[in-house]
Amino acid sequence: MTSRQIETDVVLIGAGMMSATLGALLRELAPNMEITVLEKLGGAGEESSNEWNNAGTGHAALCELNYTSEKPDGSIDTKKAVNVNEQFQISRQFWSYLVDHGLLKNPESFIMSIPHMSLVHGKKNVEFLKKRYDALVDIPLFEGMEYSEDPEQLKQWLPLVMENRSDNDPIAATKIDTGTDVNFGELTRILFNQLEGENFHIHYKHKVMNLKRTIRDNKWEVKVEDMRIGEVYIYTTKFVFIGAGGGSLSLLQKTGIPESRNVGGFPVSGLFMACHNPEIVEKHHAKVYGKAKVGAPPMSVPHLDTRYIDNKKSLLFGPFAGFSPKFLKEGSNMDLINSVRPSNVMTMLSAGVKELSLTRYLIQQVLLSKEKRMEELREFVPNAKSEDWDMVVAGQRVQVIKDTEDGGKGTLQFGTEVVTSEDGSVAALLGASPGASTAVHVMLEVLKRCYPDQMDEWMPKIKEMVPSYGQSLAENRELFKQLEASTAKTLKLSAEQTDLAMN
């Protein structure tokens, strides 16, 4: 049987936040470009981008303590926090541009103002938080952050957390009101609904079977099965973006590009406790991040989050890490085994030896009973009752394993990783947080690597969409205040946030 062949300029694999962002950028920069999106599931934003599968923090390093490490001399390294915040500001500017131009409607359906807080216990952790606060508060991106060790002040900030708290351990928190809750699942769906039409085609229930480079014209042939009818198609294209969450690694390996070698993945699953008692939900209004326990991976930093999902206020605590060999929530139990190839077997084995402590931690987490998880929750909410909280299975994350100069063979990478071919004809996104929050920055990097000849032509439009592009907001207080105020107004964030930014 001969497969039907279809020509297209761009193939985006996966209908998640990253593909939606890249598609939206290309639609603005090159409106005549023919773009095809291929998604295995039945709709957009159903895997890693789904609102129940990620924290929705709008990662801006306002409260995540793992972005500010303590140096050997005791000082605080703020570089990563500043970088993550700058990248979130880029996303925020782009969303604001799309709203201003009628390409995104009702911003309150996907972004809400919510205070971001850090909370720590114990003398050593309190000292760390105070040093972190002192290091950040004078940087424009973190202006307005408050610090307190006063229990009476903390009761006002965190009534649910401080209720009936009896321990005498020192406790401290920081609070900043310019944080947000972002529903990335809803944002993904809105973007794809807006993009679909002439020159932009989205095909659901389409599974990518193989990717092969053509000899005659150096294009890519993407072999796809329409799962609804069993028919097979071949999409021929100049550029492929693989944004399939945990499924990206296996698709990258199918390309055979040299950059896909010596790269592996380690899957980590997640669970959250969700509160279904509205009286308790109403007592808490913040995203509160603590410190990861010794031996815990960065993605397991405990946090108590106010979320807005399906127009309803929710309260989630977690994540509790777990292990599944699946690379996607809707994946196969053979995903991990099938990802081991001759080109990465030594990388994977080296990681296995180096990460024994992580393996032990994951086993301990898997074996936790609900009551043990409730005990961890009670460190945040002393009055928490088991009957008010249910378990929610979150998304799968695949942490990148690769050989690095500084870490050696088989080093586990925590973060977002972009792999591109030397000629820029294929790009793949691997890894996890900060992920969706920094989608615009990451996709602009993809464009810079894969369309270098067009960047000069596109630059005026890029700067229209992202006014701070190429500049440091951390070093330009006036520009940051101006953009913070204008985006807060456009995205209909709280009046308090707009006022804070303008003062």
Image (cartoon, rainbow, N blue to C red):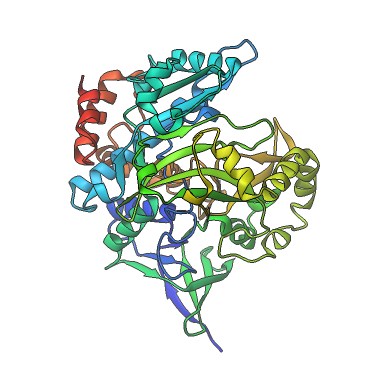
Q: Nearer the viewer, residue 447 or 227?
A: 227
- The correct choice, above or below, for 432 with respect to 169 in the image is below
Count the numbered circles shown. Answer: 0
Residue 85: x and y, percent? Answer: 41, 30
What percent of the width, then of the height, locates residue 12? Answer: 44, 61
Residue 389 against residue 45 in the figure, above or below: above
- Does residue 429 appear in this view? yes
Q: Which residue sits at x=42%, y=16%?
A: 148
In this picture, residue 278 sits left or right of residue 332 = left
Please tell me in which quadrant of the rendered image residue 133 appears: top left
Query: Image check: 79 left or right of 99?
Result: right
Q: Give the percent coordinates (x, y) of residue 232.
A: 52, 81
On screen, residue 304 versus residue 469, left or right, reads right
From this viewpoint, is residue 462 visible? Answer: no
What residue is at 68 percent from the left and 43 percent from the top? 402
Vertical position of residue 491 compared to residue 120: above or below? below
Q: Residue at x 32, y 39 (%)?
A: 92
